[in-house]
Image (cartoon, rainbow, N blue to C red):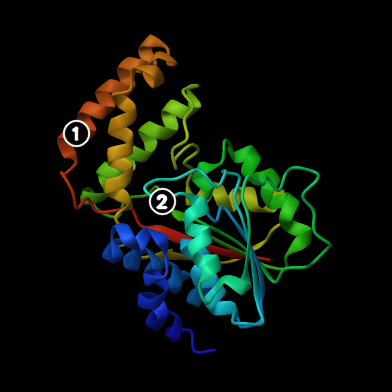
Amino acid sequence: MNYSDLGAMAPSLAAGMAAADHGLDVQLSQTRHRAALVASWRIAPDSRVLELGCGQGDMTAVLAEAVGPKGRVVAVDVAEPSYGAPVTLGDSAARLASGPLGTRIEFHFGTDVLDPSVDFPEGPFDHVVLAHCSWYFASLGQLRDTLARVRPWSRRLCFAEWDLTPASGDQLAHLLAVLIQGQMEAAGSHGEGNVRTPFSHEALLRLLPEAGWTADGSRPVDTEELQDGDWEIAACLDLAGTEERLAALSEPMRQLVLSQADALRSIAKPRGNRALAAYSVTAC
């Protein structure tokens, strides 16, 4: 397979996503990013892929293109189909299912692979993929248990997440927004945002052996085109202004969060904030 073809397919893949109706340029940048990840992982035609944390299917569509008509993508998410805005997970999945890639994809929403009722025979997948979904886990322990659970099902792990180490000062606003959200979650103020348990690249590498995986590749990933910095800054400032979420915190933690939100407002731009870099890890 010529993996550069995936990048060339990004415009048509993006146009087939339901979220493209609300911003094709944004969807295209997200799709290009995931096409570059899949190309680097060299997921071949006819592969069988288990995707955890599929969300609205940004990565699912790229994986389905990569595996070809004889491949299969089983896309799983703990969230219900009604979750998500401005497009729900269910609406996005329905759009993909009705398109040319639909026969290659099997969606399972409201599904936790830690549930004993969720099972597969040993070794049914060539790859298990987690892309920009691991900070959504409730804890590192839950992520470790999940990676251990899927270990018998797949020969290879392909993992991508944001990197907590900023490369430049203009990424500090995204970093601060992430850390504030993680701090609120750790202090007991729980929500449904994308950031619940932010952890470092190094923390993942320490965790993989505990789950039965051996890392065999790691590299930085460019995120220059992505808008996630803006999204997480807005989400963080919304949380810091929500009395219900703040009320769940102790008074010292509440004051700390409010002060950090003040600092975030002072350094964040109205839009166009540079996202943190990301990293990719493969393991077997």
- The disc placed on residue 87 is 2
Secondary structure of the residue carrying tag 1 is helix
Depicted 251 relative to depicted 56: above or below: above
| Along the line of sight, the residue nearer the viewer: 101 or 269 | 101
Depicted 65 relative to depicted 202: above or below: below
* x, y percent for residue 1: 54, 89
| Along the line of sight, the residue nearer the viewer: 101 or 238 | 101
Q: Which residue position is annotated with label 1? A: 265
Specify the farthest residue to the right. Answer: 121
Query: Crowding near pointer 2: few (<14 within 10 Å), some, many (20+)?
Result: some
Amino acid type for the residue under numbered disc 2? Val
| Along the line of sight, the residue nearer the viewer: 265 or 241 | 241
| Along the line of sight, the residue nearer the viewer: 152 or 111 | 111
Question: How far is disc 1 from disc 2 in space, using C-alphas?
Answer: 28 Å
The C terminus is located in which quarter?
Answer: bottom right
Q: On the image, which quarter does residue 73 sit in?
A: bottom right
- The disc placed on residue 252 is none
Residue appearing at x 44%, y 73% in the figure: 35
* x, y percent for residue 15: 37, 71
